[in-house]
């Protein structure tokens, strides 16, 4: 087994194509996850049990089952119900939904950390339910959990190779088809590993920055309350 | 009906493989996590470097890539592994890297006074770890280990892609043979959730048992 640089140069453009899809899937999936997660977290806080209970059950169920199986589910079963999704769309929805259940827990922790006094003060100022969430609770709940949310971006990024199982031509899939075609596994799969490692390391540095920037948000003013 | 009974057996057979993978993977991950977690805070710099390198590498690359690398690239270096061995190795090393950070932070969370007290009663370094620090740190680690175990269970699904006939693989077989997608996939989703529930229940019971009588001691 030896490392063939020539082969590396040959396959690099194809891998770059795959990397593009990987990044698109990560970004779109993450946008879905952070939005949907917030919706789940707020719905779980609802006073109406008909809303909070089923959402709670759904979140637990999605968290307890593998993403791969959920992807198969979206890709193979929904068409039977008349909804046909393209592989990438199914993949983005799968990733988004799966990680929304994780981010919803992060938001929930953030919301629980907003002192009761803030809710009471909002009531005393006669803010509506919507105004209380929008202007009082959410800004204080979300800022401190930004680093935790960013961690799930990294986690989700590392799960995108699963999309290859539902035929999305992302990085891992490109690498595997190159490997199978040329019968050389070392270079393509190692390069994919390097790609993930480099981006993850950069991302971890980014999260450290976010932690410094937002991690202690509001802690100073809160000690008195 | 009889046909479905046969397919159900196939899926249950896959469930058994999934459970085996989960148990072996967890055992291996636990051992690796403790080793790397202790290595991370070792007084010897080279040990620390190796641990940090291992942890960052396995946390930084995707489990999927690791599994493929172990299954397809290692044989070219002369280590041929069965799919089961490759699966346990990849899952254990990956989850172990996450677990190592849990071990480290739990050990560091044990009160400083405990270590000082151990020094005061003249315990050796090993005794301090074994009888004073680890029992207390383990209780702190447990809830996160429970989550990690569930992550590992969910990770086992990807070994179906290296042709190990776990639950997900068998569901695909049933889908291919019957043309019915809904039944096999809903069945395995429920089974995965059931196994995950068993894990979280077991961890919670263990936590209750281990924290008995510790209330007054812990801050």
Image (spheres, rainbow, N blue to C red):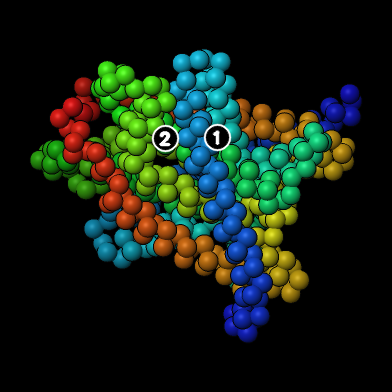
**Residue A64 picture quarter:** top right
Percent x, y of residue A132: 36, 26
Indicate which disc, 2 or 1, sits on the residue closer to the N terminus. 1
Q: Would you name the residue on which mark 2 appears?
A: A107
Q: Residue furthest bottom?
A: A6
Q: Residue furthest left?
A: B120
Q: Which mark is residue A63?
A: 1
Residue at the spot x=13%, y=41% of the render? B116
Of the pair B146 and B38, the residue shown nearer to us: B146
Q: Is residue A95 visible?
A: yes
Spatial separation of the CA atoms under disc 2 and disc 1: 15 Å
Residue A65's place in the image compared with A6, above or below, is above
Relative to residue A86, is residue B34 drawn left or right?
left
Crowdedness near tag 1: few (<14), some (14–19) or many (≥20) residues, C-alpha within 10 Å:
many
Q: How many marks?
A: 2
Percent x, y of residue B90: 56, 54
Q: Which mark is residue B32?
A: none
What chain does mark 1 sit on?
A: A
Q: Quadrant of the N terminus of chain B?
A: top right
Percent x, y of residue B168: 71, 41
Residue at the spot x=73%, y=35% of the render? B185
Of the pair A187 and A208, the residue shown nearer to us: A208
Relative to residue B13, is residue B89 drawn left or right?
left
Relative to residue B129, is residue B168 drawn left or right?
right
């Amino acid at each position: 087994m030896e490392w063939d640089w020539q082969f590396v140069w040959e396959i690099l453009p194809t891998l770059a194509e795959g990397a593009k899809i990987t990044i698109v899937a990560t970004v779109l999936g993450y946008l879905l996850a952070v939005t949907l997660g917030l919706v789940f977290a707020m719905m779980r806080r609802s006073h109406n049990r008909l809303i909070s209970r089923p959402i709670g059950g759904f979140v637990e169920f999605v968290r307890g089952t593998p993403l791969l199986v959920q992807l198969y589910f979206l890709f193979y079963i929904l068409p039977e119900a008349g909804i046909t999704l393209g592989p990438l769309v199914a993949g983005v929805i799968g990733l988004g939904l799966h990680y929304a259940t994780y981010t919803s827990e992060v938001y929930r922790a953030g919301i629980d950390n907003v002192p009761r006094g803030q809710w009471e003060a909002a009531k005393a100022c006669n803010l509506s339910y919507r105004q209380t969430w929008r202007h009082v609770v959410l800004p204080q709940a979300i800022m401190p959990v930004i680093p935790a949310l960013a961690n799930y971006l990294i986690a989700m990024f590392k799960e995108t190779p699963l999309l290859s199982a539902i035929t999305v031509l992302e990085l891992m899939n490109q690498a595997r088809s190159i490997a199978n075609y040329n019968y050389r596994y070392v270079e393509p799969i190692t390069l994919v590993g390097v790609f993930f490692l480099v981006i993850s390391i950069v991302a971890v540095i980014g999260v450290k920055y976010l932690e410094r920037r937002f991690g202690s948000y509001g802690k100073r003013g809160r000690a008195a309350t | 009906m009889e046909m479905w009974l046969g397919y159900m057996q196939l899926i249950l057979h896959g469930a058994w493989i999934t459970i085996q993978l989960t148990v072996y993977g967890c055992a291996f991950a636990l051992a690796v996590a403790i080793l790397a977690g202790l290595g991370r805070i070792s007084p010897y710099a080279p040990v620390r470097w190796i641990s940090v390198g291992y942890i960052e590498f396995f946390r930084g690359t995707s489990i999927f890539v690791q599994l493929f690398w172990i299954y397809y690239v290692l044989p070219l270096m002369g280590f041929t592994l069965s799919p089961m061995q490759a699966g346990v190795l990849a899952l254990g090393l990956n989850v172990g890297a996450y677990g190592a950070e849990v071990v480290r932070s739990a050990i560091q969370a044990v009160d400083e006074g405990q270590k000082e007290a151990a020094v005061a009663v003249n315990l050796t370094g090993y005794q301090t770890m074994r009888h004073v620090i680890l029992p207390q740190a383990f209780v702190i680690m447990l809830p996160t280990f429970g989550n990690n175990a569930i992550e590992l269970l969910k990770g086992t699904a990807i070994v179906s892609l290296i042709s190990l006939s776990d639950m997900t693989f068998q569901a695909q077989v049933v889908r291919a043979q019957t043309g019915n997608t809904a039944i096999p996939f809903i069945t395995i989703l429920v089974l995965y959730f059931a196994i995950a529930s068993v894990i979280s229940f077991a961890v919670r019971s263990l936590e209750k048992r281990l924290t008995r009588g510790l209330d007054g001691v812990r801050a």
